[in-house]
Amino acid sequence: MIAYPICPAGKVSGAKITVLKVHKGKGSFETLWSAKDSTSSEVAQGVFTVGTSDSFRLKGKPLTKKLPEGFYVEVAEITRQGKYDLSRDSWIDQSVRPSSPLKAGEYLTSDGKIVSRKWVNDQVKCESAS
């Protein structure tokens, strides 16, 4: 489950999981999973599941193997101005998962801190609607 920081006027339109692959000293990103067209307002506002078909209608690349311990999630966003933006990517480190399940409305940062949805959204500076 991902809680992506987004301004109220923005909409998540898709997401993908990538990993960095290094070959002969050169790095490139490999896409492990991708999808687009959010299935609900909750997904459009940044709370979604990666690697499954639950959160997005259109499948890009299906996940064919288990997720690695660490990966990037890149989000496609439609801004208030209607612009399509491949926005910030976030590092997901599954090794920092707590031993007990998170409570409803709790999310985990990459460094293991448990935060609220408000804290997540406070990480972006939003333009006023006026």
Image: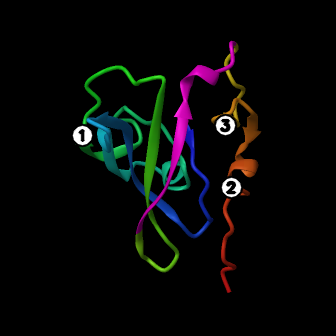
Seen in the picture, residue 59 relative to 51 is either above or below; the reply is below
Rounded to the nearest whole Å, what is the CA distance between mark 2 and mark 1? Answer: 28 Å
The structure residue drawn at horizontal position 69% and vertical position 49%, both measured from the top left corner, is 120
Instruction: Report helix, strand or loop for mark 2.
Output: helix
Q: Which mark is residue 121?
A: 2
Instruction: Report helix, strand or loop for mark 1.
Output: strand
Q: What amino acid is at disc 1? A: Lys
Q: Does 43 appear in magenta?
A: no
Q: Please state if 7 lies on the left or on the right of 25 as rendered.
A: right
* Residue extent of the magenta highlight: 85-99
Near-viewer residue (52 or 70): 70
Q: Where does the image place residue 45, in percent across and percent down from the top left?
A: 55, 55
Q: Most extreme residue toward the front, as rendered?
A: 25
Does residue 1 appear in this view?
A: no
Q: Which mark is residue 61?
A: 1
Q: Earlier in the sequence, mark 1 or mark 3?
A: 1
Looking at the image, do the residues carrying marks 2 and 1 touch, with CB atoms under 8 Å apart?
no
The structure residue drawn at horizontal position 53% and vertical position 66%, both measured from the top left corner, is 10
Q: Which residue is mark 3?
A: 109
